[in-house]
Amino acid sequence: MIGFGDDLGMAAGAGASAPPGHLDLTRLPEDRITLTGLEVFAHHGVFEFERERGQLFRIDAELAVDLSGAGDELGRTVHYGELADLIRAAVSTDPVDLIETVAERVAAVALAFAGVHAARITVHKPDAPIDAVFADVSVTVVRYGSGSAAVTRGPVVGGSPAGAA
């Protein structure tokens, strides 16, 4: 299995340990929770007609977690129903120009769940306004967290939990 760090050119076990207070990428959990193909209709895009008409976006989220102590307790893992709801809320509100921005927003949602050490987020824009035959356009970001964040409750708007100051 390829770890997130491997994708960034960092072989597992290579280099010194992370300084205190920093995530040690050489010790990223191998366990994954994956949500693939979440469909969200939204109004993102550079062109005015994209903002007016809207279009379908598909979101893939792969979360690096340590499931060794989860047992059969939902509270010790990521509730993927809540994850899907929060991603859908984050993508469907507050239109932006770039799917890169949408991907960052979704990564922040994923990393807000307790126990998530890293998130690989892909935002697909299959109906992008390109004057050519193509199957898909997508942007993928990989972001790292501490794995100890509290679960964000409520929709994330503009990268912050709704109602946050």
Image: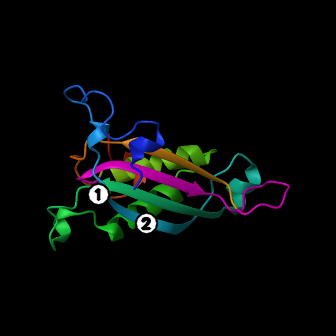
Query: Please, which colouring scheme is shown?
Result: rainbow
- Magenta span: 113-135
Q: Residue 79: name its quadrant.
A: bottom left
Give the mark, 1 or 2, whose residue is nearer the N terminus. 2
Q: Which residue is located at x 33 percent, y 33 percent?
A: 14
Q: Quick one: 162 or 100, which is closer to the camera?
A: 100
Q: Position of residue 73 (x, y in %)?
A: 15, 71
Secondary structure type for disc 2:
strand
Q: Position of residue 13 (x, y in %)?
A: 30, 38
Secondary structure type for disc 1:
loop
Magenta stretch secondary structure, dominant = loop
Q: Which mark is residue 35?
A: 2
Q: Which residue is located at x 36 percent, y 56 percent?
A: 63
Kind of residue sitting beneath label 2: Leu
Res 71 seen here: yes
Q: Position of residue 118 (x, y in %)?
A: 35, 47
- Gap between marks 1 and 2 measured at Cα: 18 Å
Q: Is residue 37 magenta?
A: no
